[in-house]
Image (cartoon, rainbow, N blue to C red):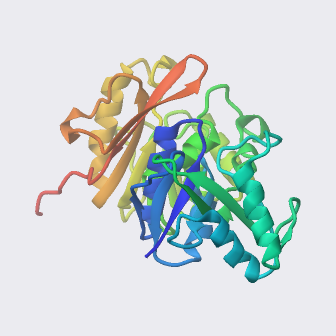
């Protein structure tokens, strides 16, 4: 295993941390303790996995590894300079254009003295100075960066089918990562809406199934998926408590959904909490052993008490006055009785 770190964004540190841990698990790795504030420790099985991890994440900035086991940034910068090439040095969390940083400048000088060159615009290597909770400085090398502009290109105003309420793509991607979606996994959203969650699952290689009681929403979700270059296995218009997919009935690796709480027109007038509980109880029977349920609910109450405490229950402000909890239930399926 290769040990490194992910620098998470500060939009929702709890959700960003959980997303990183679950995304690493989807790649065969795991989260590890980190002594550096703002960084999540990760172990991955191969160097190329860092690029794959960065490509999955929405609430992160970059993946980093230590240059050595030492705590002497200048010595590490000197060793890096002997290998040649160009580099830029910065401090984790520093604002661009901030006051001069003595450690950054000292590492840059050591790198140049050892034979490297400094290039702040397009360096071959990017090095970052971090400080542990105990006040010890260490030098990290960036091995992959997160394309934070990618989710912005999938925002609702840019899609062909638009609705005023839809989960932002960065939060939808985080939810799909909480489900540890892998290539070929079947993913169900029984409250499809505009297709935001399934779009992110599809971009990670999932096989997509969705349900919505409004045929116009199903057609619109298909438009959005096609616009993003994502295909669906089957999207159905109908009541999620009774509608059925084609035979043979699919088994799902994950159910990931953001039900229509508080929007009575989307629930046919039924109380949202009761409707969601009925739908989840039905479709949990279709989860594979070990399958995951990611349910986004209003702050203050997850309706599936029969599943016990979720692995994660993370409140996140979705819109100005709207807070949701991202609840992750693992091994959430219902065992089938023998025939």
Figure quadrant of residue 240: top left
At x 50% / y 20%, what residue is drawn?
263
The answer to whether 96 appears left or right of 279 in the picture is right
The answer to whether 178 appears left or right of 82 in the picture is left
Say whether residue 309 is visible: yes
67 or 180: nearer the eye? 67
Figure quadrant of residue 118: bottom right
* Residue 250 x/y as whole percent: 38, 61
* Residue 137 x/y as whole percent: 57, 55
* Residue 192 x/y as whole percent: 52, 41
User: Quick one: which residue is furthest to the left in this view?
Assistant: 338
The answer to whether 59 appears left or right of 187 in the picture is right
Is residue 166 depicted above or below 195 in this figure? above
Screen quadrant of the C terminus: bottom left
At x 44% / y 48%, what residue is drawn?
18
Say whether residue 231 is visible: no
Is residue 294 depicted above or below 33 in this figure? above
193 or 327: nearer the eye? 327
Total tally of numbered discs in the picture: 0
Is residue 188 depicted above or below 3 in this figure? above
* Residue 29 x/y as whole percent: 42, 68
Is residue 326 depicted above or below 118 in this figure? above
71 or 244: nearer the eye? 71
23 or 70: nearer the eye? 70
Screen quadrant of the N terminus: bottom left
At x 77% / y 71%, what residue is drawn?
111
Figure quadrant of residue 47: bottom right
């Amino acid at each position: 295993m290769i040990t490194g770190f992910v620098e998470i964004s500060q939009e929702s540190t709890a959700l960003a941390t959980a997303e990183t841990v679950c995304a690493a698990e989807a790649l065969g790795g795991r989260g590890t303790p980190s002594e550096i504030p703002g960084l999540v420790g990760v172990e991955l099985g191969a160097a190329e996995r860092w690029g794959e991890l960065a490509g999955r994440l929405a609430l992160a900035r970059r993946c980093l590894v230590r240059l050595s086991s030492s705590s002497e940034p200048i010595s590490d910068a000197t060793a890096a300079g002997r290998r040649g090439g160009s580099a830029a040095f910065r401090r984790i969390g520093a604002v661009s254009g901030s006051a001069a940083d003595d450690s950054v400048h000292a590492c840059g000088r050591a790198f140049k003295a050892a034979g490297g060159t400094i290039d702040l615009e397009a360096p071959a290597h990017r090095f970052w100075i971090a400080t542990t909770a105990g006040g010890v400085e260490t030098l990290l090398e960036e091995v992959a960066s997160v394309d934070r502009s990618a989710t912005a290109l999938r925002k609702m105003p840019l899609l062909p089918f638009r609705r005023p309420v839809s989960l932002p793509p960065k939060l939808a991607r985080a939810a799909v990562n909480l489900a540890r979606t892998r290539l070929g996994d079947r993913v169900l959203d029984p409250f499809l809406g505009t297709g935001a969650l399934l779009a992110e699952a599809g971009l990670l290689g999932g096989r997509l199934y969705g349900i919505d009681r409004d045929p116009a929403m199903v057609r619109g979700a298909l438009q959005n998926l096609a616009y993003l270059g994502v295909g669906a296995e089957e999207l159905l218009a109908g009541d999620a408590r009774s509608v059925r997919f084609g035979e043979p009935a699919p088994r799902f690796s994950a159910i990931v959904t953001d039900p229509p709480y508080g929007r009575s027109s989307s629930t046919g007038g039924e109380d949202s909490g009761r409707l969601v509980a009925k739908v989840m109880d039905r479709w949990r029977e279709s989860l594979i052993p070990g399958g995951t349920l990611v349910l986004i609910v209003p702050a203050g109450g997850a309706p599936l008490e029969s599943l016990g405490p979720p692995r994660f229950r993370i409140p996140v402000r979705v819109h100005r006055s709207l807070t949701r909890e991202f609840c992750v239930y693992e091994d959430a399926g219902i065992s089938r009785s023998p025939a």
